[in-house]
Amino acid sequence: MTRIKLNRTAQSRNQPVAEQNRTKFQDAGVFVMNLIGSPGCGKTTILEYTARHCPGQSAVIVGDVKTALDADRILQCDIPAYPIETGGSCHLSAQMIADTIARLDLDQLDYLFIENVGNLVCPSTMDLGENIKVGVLSVPEGDEKVRKYPALFLRTEVVFINKADLLPYCPYDVERVKEDCRKARPDVKVFEVSAAQGTGFGPWMEFLRQPDV
Amino acid sequence: MLDIALEAAKAHGHALRALNIKVGALSSASAEALDFCMKMLLDERSMGDVEVRIREAPARARCECGYEGEIKNLFEGCPRCGGFQRDILDGQDVTLDTIEVANDKD
């Protein structure tokens, strides 16, 4: 028996495509964000607000297992939206993004938002070629999500705590969640918002004008 | 990952006998699920005699204070300085570490 050292990660097929995407994004000067959160945490609502107030030209790629319902919501904000129906896969892959951006004129864009499939596990390790990963938490989900899904929050440069307007009605320790985010990743930026009410977005808009990551 | 193993075995010119896989503690992957899937794939390809060995790899980090060691819990600070400024060195990936192939003597 002969042993052969390979040291190849499970991402070996995904990573080169992610790097090709990243090069295309850099060449076009577009800042790309990969939004990851549970189903129903408010990713689309955050993007509706962001798309309407974005300080530049933006487009949105929306991943869902079935339907283009979320992409339709973004289109109603007069922002180009490209649905990816995964048909069962619980996360987007770099190849799905490569196939989608082939239809986009990246040079016309300043920002590209990618809404991943609602899931806190699988999307965390799948590089799409984005500049940053954005974790989306919401108050009614409970304040232990960061602890329960450390592999995601180790990788998120930005975290939203959404549905902050529900804080008076839910047991939720915001400061503890922020502290957990910083323990997982000391340089994380945390934005507390209510996307449905359109409140708390000032610092996020400031960040978009000058993303210092 | 199985394709990578088979390509490497083919390049070596001998039959694949075993895969040695590391599952990092911060990889979001389940060793049990991976084992199940890998064996199913091997059975489907009539290679049920290929061994799959999965080892869980701890997360390791280097703190800004210089301490290097295993992280058991991401939310506990460095055992030396208590801080959280650290670089993760290992444990973020699922890795096909080595394969074993038959040789001429087998």
Image: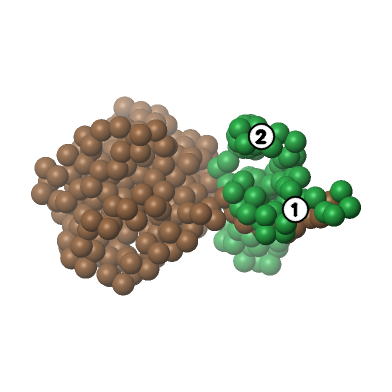
Chain colours: A brown, B green
Nearer to us in this view, A125 or B2? B2
Mark 2 surroundings within 10 Å by alpha-carbon count, few (fewer than 14), some (14 through 19), many (20 or more): few
**What chain letter is assigned to the residue under label 1?**
B
Residue A143 at what x, y percent from top left? 44, 35
Nearer to us in this view, B48 or B75? B48
Figure quadrant of residue B42: top right
Q: Residue at x 87, y 48 (%)?
A: B106
Q: Which numbered circle lies on residue B46?
A: 2
- Whether residue B99 appears in this view of the structure is yes
In the displayed structure image, the side of residue B89 where residue A123 appears, left or right: left
Badge 2 marks a residue whose secondary structure is loop
Residue beneath disc 1 = B14
Figure quadrant of residue B8: bottom right
Residue A114 at what x, y percent from top left? 31, 50
Which is nearer the N-term, disc 1 or disc 2?
1
Figure quadrant of residue A212: bottom left
